[in-house]
Amino acid sequence: MIDSIIFWWKLIGLIVIFASIAIIEYSVIKTTRLHQWSAFKDFTEFIKQKEFPITVRAEKWLNIKKRLDSFSPSDWKLAVIEADVILDDLLKRMGYKGKTLGERLKSINPANFASINEVWEAHKMRNRIAHEPESALSKDEAEKAILLYEKALKEFEYI
């Protein structure tokens, strides 16, 4: 009688042990596959990007700065607008919420963005260009705006 009780306890124990091992093994395999899939997905997303971050960023920024060398005020305006677009895109990618750059800037804690006041100044200049196309923009104003955007982009290590 006692032998049969011990036999059944051993049998139940072995079943529990094998079931536990199977569950652990299944979990490890699923977790490993999930991790591998996640790494693969990140890698493929990186490869699919049309921009390779460092070289394309630098090239975009150099093109903006080249526009300032032009004698055309429309090129200076375009440089300011393009710099604003780059900053807007960067803040979107960083997860800041809002429909516009202005809304995203309002959502930023100034403690996390030392040059936020300078960016506001440059963004106001961009708004003047966009909403008052007949307004004049001097080369000095454009250069100042680009320097302010540059300061912010360097702070976020974009350039």
Image (spheres, rainbow, N blue to C red):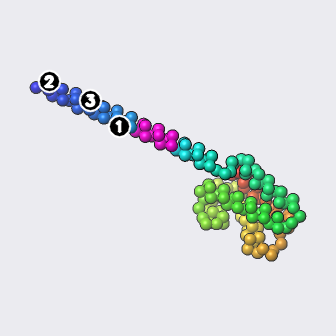
> 10 Å neighbourhood of mark 1: few (<14), some, or many (≥20)?
few
Q: Single out the residue that lies furthest toward the right.
A: 71
Secondary structure of residue under mark 1: helix
Secondary structure of residue under mark 3: helix
| Above or below, comparing residue 36 to residue 90 in the picture | above
Nearest to N terminus: mark 3 or mark 2: 2
> For the magenta stretch, what is the residue range?
27-37
Residue 40 numbered mark, or none: none
Determine whether, in the image, residue 117 is placed left or right of residue 6: right
Query: Where is mark 1, residue-wise?
Result: 23
Residue at the image position 68 percent from the left and 51 percent from the top: 51
- Give residue 137's position: percent from left, percent from top: 83, 69
Q: Single out the residue that lies furthest toward the top.
A: 3
Residue 14 numbered mark, or none: 3
Residue at the image position 78 percent from the left and 74 percent from the top: 133
Q: Is residue 34 magenta?
A: yes
Image quarter (top left, top right, bottom left or bottom right) of the N terminus: top left
